[in-house]
Image (cartoon, helix red, strand yellow):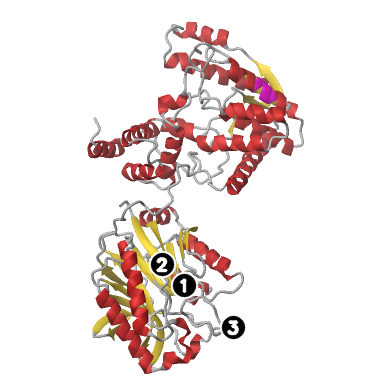
Amino acid sequence: MFGFVRIGCSTPEIRVADCSYNAQRIIRCIREADKCGVRVLCLPELCVTGYTCADLFLQPVLQRGALAALSIICEETAQCSVLFAVGLPFAHGGKLYNCAAVVKGGKILGLVPKTYLPNYNEFYEQRWFVSAEDEDVCLVDVNGQAVPFGTDLIFACEEESDLRVAVEICEDLWAPLPPSTAHAMAGATVILNLSASNEVVGKAEYRRQLVQSQSARLVCAYAYADAGRGESTTDLVFAAHNLIGENGVLCSESALFENETIAYDIDVEKLRIERMRNTSFATQSAEADGYETVWFSQETACVGKLLRNVSRAPFIPSDERERNARCEGILQMQAEGLRKRIEHAHAQKAVVGISGGLDSCLALLVTTRAMARLGRPMTDVVAVTMPCFGTTKRTRSNAQTLCEALGVTFETVDITDTVNSNFRDVGQDPEVHDVTFENTQARVRTLVLMNLANRLGGLVVGTGDLSELALGWATYNGDHMSMYGVNASVPKTLVRHLVHYAAQTAETDVLRDVLTDILNTPVSPELLPAKDGEISQQTEAIVGPYELHDFFLFYAIRYGFAPRKILYLAQQAFCGDYPDAELYRWLRNFCWRFFAQQFKRSCVPDGPKVGSVSLSPRGDWRMPSDAAPALWMAEMEEIKQELGLD
């Protein structure tokens, strides 16, 4: 299942000090979670007895009742596949500990005592329990079974090497140095927190922040199970606020006061890859850190549909407010990068080749922002349209209207004669519409821009985007080249949203309308002759849909996933929109083109990084231009056989 493991949090409805009743409710939660395919389950702190037992914790009757209930829980869940952690008090060495029992297949794998005991405001835990801070791992007897006891325990799955579980309890997370930090450094990828956090105004949001930030710092999955209905309300109220976070993202959350079970398919392979990339995250072997590894067997295959949001547009936030904020932030970053470059180069003009398409439109919008930041007139932006064989009336008109709406200097240079001259120089038949026919136009356009910039004392602003760099959809030393590439780390799907945002926030109706028409124009390099005045060459019909390629790009580069996993994720995200054969076709095309076109990325101009994926050879991506794609193509062939494709 490509590293996906379904984890869950469940809050049983309990009765304070009624261990037999609580055991049955806990068993019900475990069985229901097991049926739903949950493979790692977190239950609340001290839920076998109830967290609010107070001085009853010191009663031997309650302590024995808790152990008897744990025995029943183990027996009744022996056939379940889920590994779970359940809270209870446990007496050892003449002291009482607040513990989590980790159980799988009817066997107690370990007892993890709480480290930080709150003893302030409404909390009095030090009245009953002692801290496990100085406890080394040892064996203790639990219902006749020798069980590892201590905080330094890692529960490792034999079948899924990236699934390594550790436990902390409630206040441990709120402490300045949570035990989970050491757990993660010892290799734990999943942290379970058994909690009994009472509800007061503002506390729910703080819990969310804690879970998100700790999962981000530790590059881990964090499951937080909270006490709820059934606890004493003498002085406190508990809301059963269950949370699951993964690497800084809050993935699943229960409604307050509902005693719900939540579940989410975390990606432990992704967590391992993220840690591997992050050189600041220096894990050691568990044994080197004094941890004891407890092994368990677990089939981790997820049941039914993947319980995970796989966005078909991973570069773009789904929430409109967040998306607009993202767009504004990116435009500011692009403009600031260009502002600095213009200022440093003492450029008198900023020269932009304008085609009437999306990429050049975005580059021009960014350039006008940069010029405004410099306090210079918009006429210092020189937009140049260079019509030739494939230019249509629509794109030519949109280019001019856009420039007039922005108030920039607009120039037209018809390159037809220059291109034909080059054809004669190299012996190209103008009736042969091959790669030479296309690339000559692109290179002449770049030549015009560079020479014009030299004459004006200006700087050529590049228009090519991240998706084009990934696919190599650019003419080497043509549109591939500029003096500063403002769109270099912006994928095509995001370019569209940036232009859409600019249309939404346009100051005039004319600007809004022309931006809208540019958005509705098919993506095309316009290098082949137009047919009946219409665009004859549509990029996505040749290289494939950009929404797919940006999806492939994100998971291949951001996380380094193998083709088989990327295809699986694409099947989840685009279910019903693309058949498997089409997904396979374009993924194979992406893999082949990505390797074949690295030589273009090895010498791209400077440009600002604006997101988590960049292909700059000076920044995020270093790859030999002659690297062989054999391993990736071999996996694609295996996938082809598995799908039964010709």
Image coords of residue 392 (percent x, y): 56, 15
Q: Which residue is mark 1?
A: 226
Q: Answer whether labels 2 and 1 touch (C-beta < 8 Å).
A: yes
Q: Earlier in the sequence, mark 3 or mark 2?
A: 2
Residue 369 visible to the viewer: yes
* Visible residue check, residue 457: no
Which quadrant holds residue 112? bottom left
Which residue does the image show at 40% across and 89% down from the upper left? 96
Residue annotated with mark 2: 9
Residue labelled with disc 3? 121
Q: CA distance from mark 2 to mark 1?
A: 8 Å
Residue appearing at x 32%, y 85% in the figure: 67
Q: Identify residue type, mark 2.
A: Cys
574 to 181, vertically: above or below: above
Residue 307 lies in quadrant: bottom left
Q: Amino acid under label 1?
A: Asp
